[in-house]
Amino acid sequence: MEATQTITPRLFGAIRVDEQWTRWSGAGDVRQRSSYHRFETAVGFRLTPDITLRAAFMTRKGYVVNFWDDQVLASIVFAKKLL
């Protein structure tokens, strides 16, 4: 699930939630269920009509780990229709 909100014509905020599950068989044919969780929040600033600066924080817990992995993300997006 994802939600985006325009704050001003140049500024936006976004949140993303991703949850997945899988079932598998372990040793001795024991049935297991594992889950994956990811939560991300971001803010973006449209520098020009073609260039957007974006900063985000993401935390996730993978299928085979028992801890949350935190990340800080930054990106520069160039989007222009070429043809």
Image: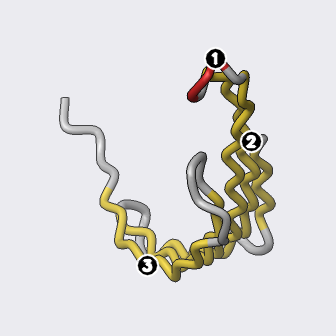
Q: Position of residue 27 (x, y in %)?
A: 56, 28
Residue at point 43%, 78% (across, down): 74
Decide which of 48, 37 is in the foreground and name it.
37
Question: Which class describes the residues within 10 Å of circle 2: few (<14), some (14-19), or many (20+)?
Answer: few
Label 3: element kind: strand
Residue at point 41%, 72% (across, down): 48
Question: Which class describes the residues within 10 Å of circle 3: few (<14), some (14-19), or many (20+)?
Answer: few
Q: Is residue 73 left or right of residue 76?
A: right
Classify 65 as above or below 58.
above
Decide which of 63, 18 is in the foreground and name it.
63
Quadrant of the drawing holding the N terminus:
top right
Mark 3–mark 1 Cα distance, whole angstroms, equals 44 Å
Q: Which mark is residue 29?
A: 1
Which mark is in front, 3 or 1? 1
Residue at point 34%, 52% (across, down): 79
Mark 2 vs mark 3: which is more N-terminal?
Answer: 2
The residue to which callout 2 is attached is 19
Callout 2 amino acid: Glu
Mark 1 vs mark 2: which is more N-terminal?
Answer: 2
Q: Is residue 10 left or right of residue 15?
A: left
Which mark is in front, 1 or 2? 1
CB under 8 Å between discs 3 and 1: no
Quadrant position of residue 29: top right
Quadrant of the drawing holding the C terminus:
top left
Callout 3 amino acid: Ala
Which mark is in front, 2 or 3? 2
